[in-house]
Image: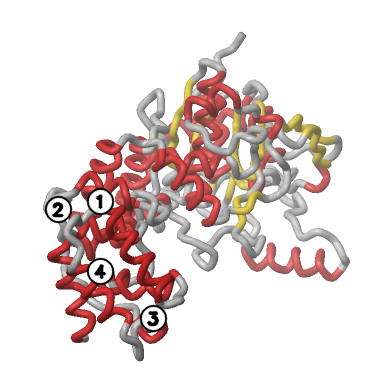
Amino acid sequence: MKEIVTRFAPSPTGTLHIGGVRTALFNYVYAKQNNGKFLIRIEDTDRERSQKKYEENILNNLSSIGLIPDEKPINQSQRNNIYIKAAEKIIESGNAYWCDCSQENLDQMRKEQIAAGKKPMYDGRSRNLGIQQSEKTVLRLATPEDGEIIVNDLIRGEIKFNNSELDDLILLRSDGTPTYHLCNVVDDYEQNVTTVIRGEDHISNTPRQIHIQKALGYPDLEYAHLPLVLGTDKKRLSKRNAATSLEEYRDKGYLDSAILNTLARLGWSQGENEVFYLDDLIKNFNIKEVQKAGAIFDITKLDWLNSQHLSKLSLEEFKNLLKPFLDEIGININDHENVDLLIESLRTSDNNLSGIANMLYPYYKDIKEYDDAAIKKFVTGNTILHDLKEILHNIDNWDEESINNALTKYQEDNNLKVPQVNQPVRIALTGKTKSPGLGLTLVIFGKELSLERIEKLLTF
């Protein structure tokens, strides 16, 4: 049985897109579960838009998230001679011809086709003219004019394409450079690719590329076209809906494992099991179970999965991952006398490490600002905080039980609701209305600092 080889072929015209990571992930998993190879090819023939910094971003991010290729990535920009030789082979086989149609002629042809209610496409007018190569000619593939191409897509089943609806695509431009389709087909053959897993926006490219394969005598490939990644508005994911680059999510403190988990769920599900890791995916993924409809990327799902993955870390693992985010806001994680209690208590305070780091800020540094709406709702115009300052000052055993008992007694004696008592103190300690249990929060701050913070808010 032939070794399964998949490939991810990004263009380095921007940072690594979250949809691209999903495509790379499914290619990687399919190869690994078949004991095959996962390869990367940089399609950088667009000289104007391709940049080395984007190539480095793509390769570094794929590698660091765990999608490491089994061979050194190749660059199309360094393989021009290979493509030219392939084009020459197609010419020799009689499956290509030179065309010297001007842009004006092509535009007029398409106008006439549209006016006649026909699909605008090249009509093959140069096919049998025996035109010789010149500075004005392009090389076109002589596509069969009848019959059909049938693709047995691993996800979508049988897809039929009528050859009559495919025009004679360009293989070499007038400057002699190869086009995307030729490069793509030749590289898949040269890299021994057996299975092409890519987005459904490439479905229309498939019959064209199969015709090039046949003209070159290349073997057939397997195809699987993934549903597009959509935003919550059910349109293609863009910055309108959410961040689109992998880097942005990692910079916010989403774990690699949670990102991969979320992306794997875009179009594929594993029964009722929502939380899993890359090894689980390699074990259980079935490409034939991938849905055909567009897959919606919802940040709330990523938030939930990230919180689940964070909860499975040991305290030391969690602290090590959190440190860079605390460093970024000028905090040394060890500058707190109750550091382990503090981190353990606040590790679920947000859905990502950046948010958790910001929640920790008031436990290490003076409060920058208070939540104005919270001040108006819970502090302004009452004497509760004054009363609580005295009650807390008189507590000798500064432990969670003693503090909670004192707060509960005050609440009941004065016929108050819990938030009326607890929130003014929370705001004094953290500037916000969110914290762990109030007794625990006061223990973490310590008696002296807690009273200082309450006095500061009263003064404010």
Q: Answer with mark 1 or mark 2, whichever residue precedes in sequence.
A: 2
Percent of width and height locating residue 234: 66, 60
Q: Is residue 170 above or below residue 359?
A: above
Alpha carbons under labels 2 and 3: distance apart: 28 Å
Residue, disc 4: 429
Q: State left or right for residue 2 relative to residue 424.
A: right
Q: Amino acid at mark 4?
A: Leu
Q: Is residue 404 above or below residue 214?
A: below
Q: Answer with mark 3 or mark 4, whichever residue precedes in sequence.
A: 3
Q: Please state which of residues 15 and 338 is positioned toward the viewer in this rendering.
A: 338
Q: Answer with mark 1 or mark 4, whichever residue precedes in sequence.
A: 1
Alpha carbons under labels 3 and 1: distance apart: 25 Å
- Circles 3 and 1, Cβ within 8 Å, touching? The answer is no
Q: Amino acid at mark 2?
A: His
Q: Nearer the viewer, mark 2 or mark 3?
A: 3
Q: Inspect this view and state whether residue 455 appears.
A: yes
Residue, disc 3: 378
Q: Residue 118: which quarter of the image?
A: bottom right
Q: Please state which of residues 212 and 391 is positioned toward the viewer in this rendering.
A: 391
Q: Is residue 57 above or below residue 404?
A: above
Quarter that holds the N terminus: top right
Label 1 sits on a secondary structure element that is: helix
Alpha carbons under labels 4 and 2: distance apart: 15 Å
Residue, disc 2: 336
Q: Amino acid at mark 3?
A: Phe
Residue, disc 1: 342
Alpha carbons under labels 3 and 4: distance apart: 14 Å
Q: State left or right for residue 193 relative to residue 411.
A: right
Q: Answer with mark 4 or mark 2, whichever residue precedes in sequence.
A: 2
Residue 114 — which label? none
